[in-house]
Amino acid sequence: MTPLTRTALPAALLLAGGLLALSLPAASSEASTTTLCNSQTASVDGGAYTVNNNEWGSGAPECITTNGNAEFRMVNSSIANGGQGAPGGYPHIYKGCDYGACTSGSGLPIQVSKIRAGSVTTSWSTSQPGGSNNIYNAAYDVWFNQTSTTSGQPNGTELMVWLRRQGPKHPYGRQVASNVRVGGHRYNVWYGNAHGFNTVTYLMTHGQRSVNRLDLRHLEADAVGRGYLRKSWWLISVEAGFEVWQGGKGLATNSFSVNVNR
C-alpha cells in the first residue's frame, strides 16, 4: 500500500491526504549507486521502472539505494512505530502511472475488460530479514482507476498481494475468505472501503520471498467476481515493496519485472 502523498496511501491505515513535494535523488559515494531518503525517487532500467523510497509515516532516518537496475535495498532504518497504526513508509518499485508520474513504454493503462490470461504478469525476488525487531510486509500494490488516467489518488480499487508478513500486522479491513485458490496460489482475502475506493488484499497462506510470472488476470477476475472491481475500470500501475512498521534494514528487491501483452 502506498500513501496519499504522490503515491497512494497504504490501506493498513485509515488514509488521509496530503501531497508531498518530490525531492531529487542524492548521489551516494559510489558513482553507480543512488541513495534515496524521505520521498525521493529515481528512474531505473532506462526509464522502464521508478524506485520510490516513500517514507511518509515516520521522520526517522531511513534510506534505500539502487544501482540503476530494477532493484533497491534498504541500507538503514530507524523506523520504530512498534507495529502500531500506519507503517512508516512503503519503499517500492513500480511500472505505470503514479499520481501522474509515468514510466516509459509501460503498456499501461489497460482496461480490466481487456485483461486476459498472460496480459499482465510480474516476477519479483526479495530479501526479507527476520528477527523480532522487524515488522513489515512484502506486498504488491496494484491500482485501478475508474478512468484511464488520473493526476491524483486512484478512485477505483487497490488490489494488494501480500507475499509474506514479518510480525503481527494484518491487511486492512476484515477477512472475507480463507484458503482460496487463485491462479496457483492460496490466499486469505481481506476487504475494506473507508475512503471512497475498495481495498482488497490477497494474503498468501504460505509466505513467499519470490514469485515468478504471477498472472494478475486471476486475481483481477476474482476481485471482479467478489464485486470489488469493475470491468470498465483501468489498471494504471503495478507496485512492489515493503510496508515497514519497525526496522527493515536489509529488505531488498533483488529483481522485479512487469510484462504487459495486449
Image (cartoon, rainbow, N blue to C red):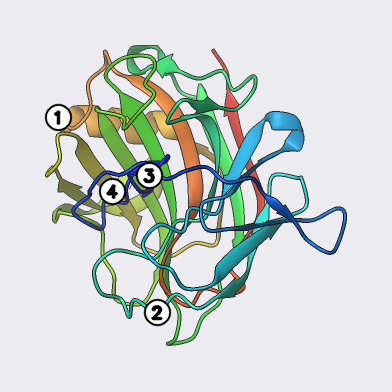
- Image coords of residue 157 (percent x, y): 26, 33
Regarding residue 184, the answer to whether it shows in the image is no
Q: Mark 4 — residue?
A: 201
Upstream in the sequence, badge 4 or badge 3?
3
Q: Mark 2 — residue?
A: 80
Q: Nearer the viewer, residue 172 or 74?
A: 74
Q: Amino acid at mark 4?
A: Thr
How far is disc 2 from disc 1 in space, using C-alphas? 37 Å
215 relative to 171, above or below: above
Q: Nearer the viewer, residue 21 or 241?
A: 21
Q: Amino acid at mark 2?
A: Ala
Regarding residue 214, the answer to whether it shows in the image is yes
Q: Mark 4, residues whose alpha carbon is within 10 Å: few (<14), some, or many (≥20)?
A: many
**Residue under the image location 32 percent in, 51 percent down:** 10
Query: Which mark, by number, is residue 227?
Result: 1
Upstream in the sequence, badge 3 or badge 1?
3
* Quarter of the figure with residue 72: bottom right
- Image coords of residue 23 (percent x, y): 57, 46
- Left or right of 217 on screen, residue 64: right
Q: Mark 3 — residue?
A: 5
Q: Secondary structure at mark 2?
A: loop
